[in-house]
Image (spheres, rainbow, N blue to C red):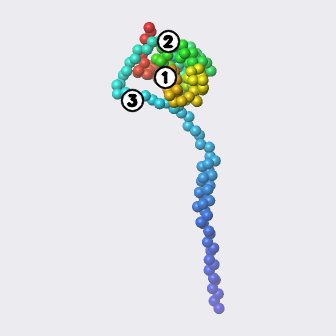
């Protein structure tokens, strides 16, 4: 008698839940991994002007010159300074400027400086303006700037306009690139 070996059937795996499990793992990893938040500066730029070079004569007393050097040092009007002093210097400059509406903060940054140092300077400048606007809001509207209406905020922004001109310094051998719209003139 011939013996026939009976073929055994391999039991099949139930794979219907595999897709569900993999999808849940994907969601788990997406939720639990930390995503680095991008740092950035929110700015509303003026509309683009079709003219190439615009030169405005500005009284040198209305310009505060801030420079970020290659080694992340801060120079304010060609004098060494620190980030901790910057807010009070900007606040004092804006409040004592002969023509408050036409003052300019000129920020020149060496391209070798770090973004973190640049970011700190920008934060201090913006914080100085926020402090000025908040103090004015408390004085005129008896509430903090954050609780003012849109119309009141607009008036406060007109009272303390944020006027920052930025330029870059390539290196000491090459001439520096300056914002084309600013030339200073002593009066």
Label 2 packing within 10 angstroms: few (<14), some (14-19), many (20+): few
Judged from the image, the secondary structure of the residue bearing numbered disc 3 is loop
Location of the C terminus (image quadrant): top left
109 w.r.t. 93: above or below: below
Quadrant location of residue 95? Answer: top right
Q: Give the alpha-carbon distance from disc 3 to disc 1, as whole Å.
A: 21 Å
Quadrant location of residue 72? Answer: top right
Residue 121, given in percent of the width and then of the height, sits at 56, 24
Please name the residue shown 60% across and 26% down the image: 144
Q: Earlier in the sequence, mark 2 or mark 3?
A: 3
- From the image, tell me which residue sits under label 2: 98
Residues 44 and 175: in front is 44
Residue 182, given in percent of the width and then of the height, sits at 42, 18
Please name the residue shown 59% across and 42% down the image: 35
Label 1 packing within 10 angstroms: few (<14), some (14-19), many (20+): few
Q: Are marks 1 and 2 in contact (CB under 8 Å)?
A: no
Residue 179, given in percent of the width and then of the height, sits at 43, 22
Please name the residue shown 59% across and 57% down the image: 23
- From the image, tell me which residue sits under label 1: 158
Is residue 96 in view?
A: yes
Judged from the image, the secondary structure of the residue bearing numbered disc 2 is loop
Quadrant location of residue 126? Answer: top right
136 w.r.t. 17: above or below: above
Mark 1 or mark 2, which is nearer to you?
1
Q: Give the alpha-carbon distance from disc 2 to disc 3, as whole Å.
A: 29 Å
Q: Earlier in the sequence, mark 3 or mark 1?
A: 3
Residue 52, given in percent of the width and then of the height, sits at 35, 24
Q: Earlier in the sequence, mark 1 or mark 2?
A: 2
Q: Give the alpha-carbon distance from disc 1 to disc 2, as whole Å.
A: 16 Å
Number of numbered callouts drawn:
3
């Amino acid at each position: 008698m011939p013996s026939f070996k009976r073929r055994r059937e391999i039991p099949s795996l139930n794979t219907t839940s595999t897709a569900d499990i993999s999808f849940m793992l994907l969601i788990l990893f997406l939720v639990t991994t930390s995503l680095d938040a991008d740092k950035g500066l929110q700015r509303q730029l003026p509309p683009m002007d079709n003219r190439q070079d615009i030169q405005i004569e500005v009284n040198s007393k209305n310009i505060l010159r801030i420079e970020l050097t290659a080694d992340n040092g801060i120079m304010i009007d060609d004098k060494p300074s620190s980030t901790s002093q910057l807010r009070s210097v900007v606040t004092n400059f804006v409040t004592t400027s002969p023509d408050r509406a036409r003052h300019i903060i000129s920020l020149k940054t060496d391209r070798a400086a770090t973004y973190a140092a640049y970011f700190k300077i920008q934060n201090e400048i913006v914080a100085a303006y926020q402090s000025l606007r908040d103090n004015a809001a408390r004085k005129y509207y008896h509430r903090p700037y954050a609780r003012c209406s849109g119309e009141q905020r607009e008036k406060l922004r007109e009272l303390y306009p944020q006027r920052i001109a930025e330029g870059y310094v390539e290196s000491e051998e090459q001439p520096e690139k300056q914002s084309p719209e600013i030339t200073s003139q002593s009066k």
